Amino acid sequence: MSQTIGLTRLAYSRVWHHVSASTPHPTLSTIRSPPEAITPPSLGRLASRIAVLLMGKHKPIWDPSTDCGDYVVVTSCAALHMTGNKKWRKTYYRHNTKPGSLRSITMDGLMDKHGGAEVLRKAVSGMLPKNRLREKRLARLKAFEGDAHPYKGNLLRFGGKVVGSEGWEEMVRAVREGDKACL
């Protein structure tokens, strides 16, 4: 007898999510009111939300041992928002296990050398569980410095509007009202 109820194949299907690192976000912002003071999400809040989507914790079928997460496309990584002086004080270390080979670089230097996408990738990597699924989950993170990316056709849409863009809430309401009218 099966222990699952419903359409599990649909639940395991991967969806493409779009996140912009530069647009103000009402729920991920550190400032709640007034509405014109809402800031873009900070690096930590953005990375934790992306980690949840990559793991699949937002789905009702989530299981720690299965890889049921979605794809995430992040744009405008060059304009990552950081609070305080983290951009100049946060240091990343690497070591190749030979004596005297400890190397360090600040977040500012890493952004100059590799861009904001690498900083975001390191933040998300630190928030994912340290197991054999980590690299597969990180491979589904697509981060870009600007607004252009090749995955525009894959993004989740409601009535032709990409989820997260301006006016998509109205399209969701229109679709739901149409469904209510059919019933």
Image: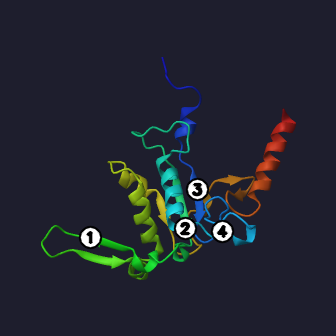
User: Identity of the amino acid at label 3?
Assistant: His
Q: Earlier in the sequence, mark 3 or mark 4?
A: 3
Given residues 9 and 27, the one toward you in this image is 27
Q: Earlier in the sequence, mark 2 or mark 3?
A: 3
Q: Earlier in the sequence, mark 3 or mark 1?
A: 3
Q: Are marks 3 and 1 in contact (CB under 8 Å)?
A: no
Residue 93, above or below 170: below
Q: Is residue 150 visible?
A: no
User: Identity of the amino acid at label 1?
Assistant: Arg
**How many other residues sit within 10 Å of disc 3, few (<14), some (14-19) or many (≥20)?**
many
Residue that label 2 marks: 42
Q: Residue at x 77, y 61 (%)?
A: 167
Cα distance in 3D space between marks 2 and 4: 10 Å
Callout in the foreground (3, 4): 4
Q: Are marks 3 and 4 in contact (CB under 8 Å)?
A: no
Cα distance in 3D space between marks 2 and 3: 18 Å
**How many other residues sit within 10 Å of disc 2, few (<14), some (14-19) or many (≥20)?**
some
Residue that label 3 marks: 17
Residue that label 4 marks: 24
Callout in the foreground (2, 1): 2
Q: Earlier in the sequence, mark 2 or mark 1?
A: 2
Q: Secondary structure at mark 2?
A: loop
The image position of residue 108, as x and y in percent, is 42, 80
Question: Quick check: 138 left or right of 171?
Answer: left
Cα distance in 3D space between marks 4 and 1: 33 Å
Q: Are marks 2 and 1 in contact (CB under 8 Å)?
A: no
Q: Residue at x 39, y 74 (%)?
A: 90
